[in-house]
Image (cartoon, rainbow, N blue to C red):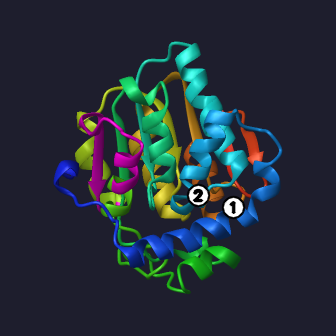
Amino acid sequence: MKALELAALPSRNGPVDLAKDGLFGARYLLRNWRALRAREFSPSRLAKVMGIARYTQVTPPGLKTLFQLLDRIEHDGIAGDLVECGVWRGGVAALICDSPAGRKRTTWLFDSFEGMPEGTAEDSCGHSSALARGRLGGKLAPVGTNVATPEFLVTLLRRFRADLSRVRVFKGWFQETLPVAVPEMGPIALLRIDGDFYASTKVCLEQLYPKVAPGGCVIIDDYNTFEGCRKAVQEYFGGKTPELHEISQEQGVWFVRTL
């Protein structure tokens, strides 16, 4: 299983595509307008956030934290690559690649590009079960939610003029792609996990956390939203869970690897 050849992928620019994307973007802006108006971002970064509105579900507090941690690893001189597990349409990935950190590091992006797999018994509560459409058998098979394609991603990366030679994209389930990609990786300076479910979060931690450099930052997007995600983090770290910093009640937590 190899990384996708991004240069060979077409951009997603048809009129129907743009109309659908525009509707999603308008909904995002309306839902988050108050936070966007709160002057939490510099003018240049606000423009970038507005530019990815149709390509992300991450709230403004989550995007603000992303910017802060990208700045932090640069300021602290933390060597290593940037990794996102759970790319969807590529909004966060575009911001990562466009950042000062992203312009001189390799960015690794992982997604099924088929949507969500089945959940497990650990994902049986509330929104988790709904996202899995009640399918909790744990099969690596798409259930039809949060579906996107690599074309969504490459369209946005080109719009942000990302250096595609620094971007590695793996299409497939984390359980299948991570064991292939991890041996090729060096240290990780920033790891963002947005897998929603228990099994997806657990395999990302098992495969990638040992690669996180001391002083590197980790974002767990769904810690406060999905019980299965939270259980995976707690089980992985046992009684030695790092000091967690809440992003928001909706958006999860981040922490620094200290050892």
Residue 61 counted in the magenta span: no
Q: Is the residue marked by circle 1 packed among few (<14), some (14-19), or many (20+) residues within 10 Å?
A: some
Q: Quadrant of residue 128?
A: bottom right
Up/down of 18 relative to 220, above or below:
below
Residue at 50% x, 52% y is 91
The secondary element bearing badge 2 is classed as: helix
In this image, 118 relative to 154: left or right?
Answer: right
- Residue type (three-letter) at the residue carrying disc 1: Leu
Say whether residue 240 is visible.
Answer: no
101 is higher (above) or lower (below) than 36: above
Where residue 178 appears, as percent x and y from the top left, is: 31, 49
Whole-angstrom CA distance, mark 2 to mark 1, is: 7 Å
In the current view of this chain or complex, which residue is farthest to the front?
15
Q: Position of residue 209 (x, y in %)?
A: 46, 37
User: Mark 1: which secondary structure?
Assistant: helix
Q: The N terminus lies in which quarter of the figure? A: bottom left
Give residue 97's position: percent from left, percent from top.
42, 37
Residue pointed to by mark 1 = 29
Closer to the N terminus: mark 2 or mark 1? 1
Marks 2 and 1 in Cβ contact (< 8 Å)? yes
Q: How many marks?
A: 2
Q: Quadrant of the C terminus?
A: top right
Three-letter residue code for mark 2: Ala
Horizontal relation, residue 41 to residue 181: left or right: right
Q: Residue at x 32, y 27 (%)?
A: 186
Residue 111 in view: yes
Q: Residue at x 66, y 70 (%)?
A: 27
Q: Which residue is mark 2?
A: 53
Q: Is residue 22 above or below residue 253?
A: below
Give the residue at x 53% y 55%. 194
Q: What range of the chain is rendered magenta?
A: 155-173
Residue 185, disc? none
